[in-house]
Amino acid sequence: MKSINFSKNASQKLNKILIISSVGLLFFQFQYWEGSSWAIAAFFIFFGLLFSFLALYFIITGSNADFIFSVVFATIAAFTAGNGLIVFPVAALLIYIRNGFSKTFFIWLVTGILIFFSYFWKYITPADQTPIIKTLSEKPLKVMLFFLSYLGANFKQVPSYGNVLSTIAGIIFILILIYLFNKKYYNINPLISGIILFLFLTMAANSIARVDGGFIPRYNIFSTIFLICISIAIIEIFSGKIKVVHLILFFSFCVIFNIYSFLVNFNYIKKMNYTITEGAILAKAGDYSLLIYPDSSNVRKLLQAGEQKNIYHIPDFSYGDVTASDISIQGKKETGDIENEYNNFQNTEDYLYINGWINTKNKLLNKNTKIYIILKSDNNTFIFNTYPMRRKELKENNMSRTEELSYSFVLLKKDMKLPSGNYTIGFYIESEGQYHLLLTDDNYKL
């Protein structure tokens, strides 16, 4: 941000610290948490952005050596993620603004066309993908609303199509972009301008592709960096009028924003951790069905190949990994008001896998309810955490039963080294400060 020119009565060092800290707080937050739990998504989104931004960085320097670097990184970006192709028209615009229809411009244009046709050579369109022309002609308003809410997605932590708050934020961003264009900000900072345009076009393309599929948290990385770049642009435009107090207010907003993002998204991260743990435990028993949807055959092959080559392996688990160590039923009486229905009960030689529906007769349960499974023998009592039942299972049941909560539980008999014996299965529920306890008549040998 070399173009920043703060007022003389402000401390330059403090200004830099506040700006860098604010940008860090905006970037390192949990809104795009899903990228950390989905390896393929993390690879093509994060690395695609890295290569795209490097290509834009090298294109603005103007030297021949950097131009070659830009071509290399733009090509890698295009074949890392589809939106990497957008680098070519964006960079072409930056070259034109600086040098007009120069030799460099035409070389870049020809390179982009070659990469474009190489990318789509023998391209196989996904069976569930609606043609772009059809989507735009049949759902123009829906696409527009989705796009606006996508631009402002940071202001609605788990944004949905047409959300009022994120849509209003998107409209404000459009107005800011018009203002930046009118101020010819692209001459002040061509790199940030290029990144803003790249993200803008990326989110526009995603809106067309995702308008029917809905918003996915991992895509919020684009909205996040877009917000950061808009903030930098505003600071640069008004740097001569900005005082320390303004940056302190901006920093305070970023702190609150970061904390709020953590609080809102932390539960989603915990649920994903439960889901992955459940799938990994079941995969240890040879069932890979919960690790990937809709086809588990690929993940089985990848994991087995990785283990054979000593690249990675599914971690070992003990019953302590799934035990609810802070819960005790000692001295508590059965309440007898729990209603349970098994959806799936598999008691094999290798594992015990249970999922089902549970409720209480007086319907006190809500989404904050915690469900635990009890295994009680003559000598031992174990209480285990359960996981929210996978969506795949929910679709196989009557979705109208929304008043009931679901649970899922996997226990490896050999690997977790649970003491053998005859165990009675029970349920312990905590909801709104009350507990519910039931020991069933179901008795199984483990």
Image (spheres, helix red, strand yellow):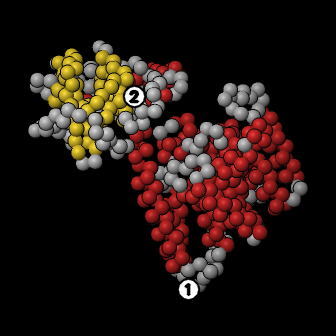
User: Compared with residue 218, is residue 342 higher up or lower down, i.e. above or below?
Assistant: above
At 39% from the left and 28% from the top, the residue drawn is 280
At 41% from the left and 49% from the top, the residue drawn is 266
At 43% from the left and 39% from the top, the residue drawn is 272
Q: Residue furthest bottom?
A: 9
User: Compared with residue 167, is residue 41 higher up or lower down, i.e. above or below?
Assistant: above
User: Compared with residue 158, is residue 19 higher up or lower down, i.e. above or below?
Assistant: below
At 69% from the left and 61% from the top, the residue drawn is 174
Give percent across and percent down for residue 274: 38, 36
Residue 405 sits in which quadrant? top left
Left/right placement of residue 22 relative to residue 280 reads right
Q: What residue would you read off at disc 2?
A: 280
Which quadrant of the figure contains the C terminus? top left
Give percent across and percent down for residue 195: 68, 56
Instruction: Residue type at mark 2: give it.
Output: Ala
Q: Residue furthest top?
A: 349
Secondary structure at badge 2 equals: helix
Q: Nearer the viewer, residue 60 or 328?
A: 328
Q: Is residue 269 visible?
A: yes
Instruction: Residue type at mark 1: give it.
Output: Asn
Pointer 2 local density, CA inside 10 Å: few below 14, some 14–19, many at least 20? many
Left/right placement of residue 145 relative to residue 432 reads right
Which quadrant of the figure contains the N terminus? bottom right
Left/right placement of residue 321 relative to residue 74 reads left
Q: What residue would you read off at disc 1?
A: 9
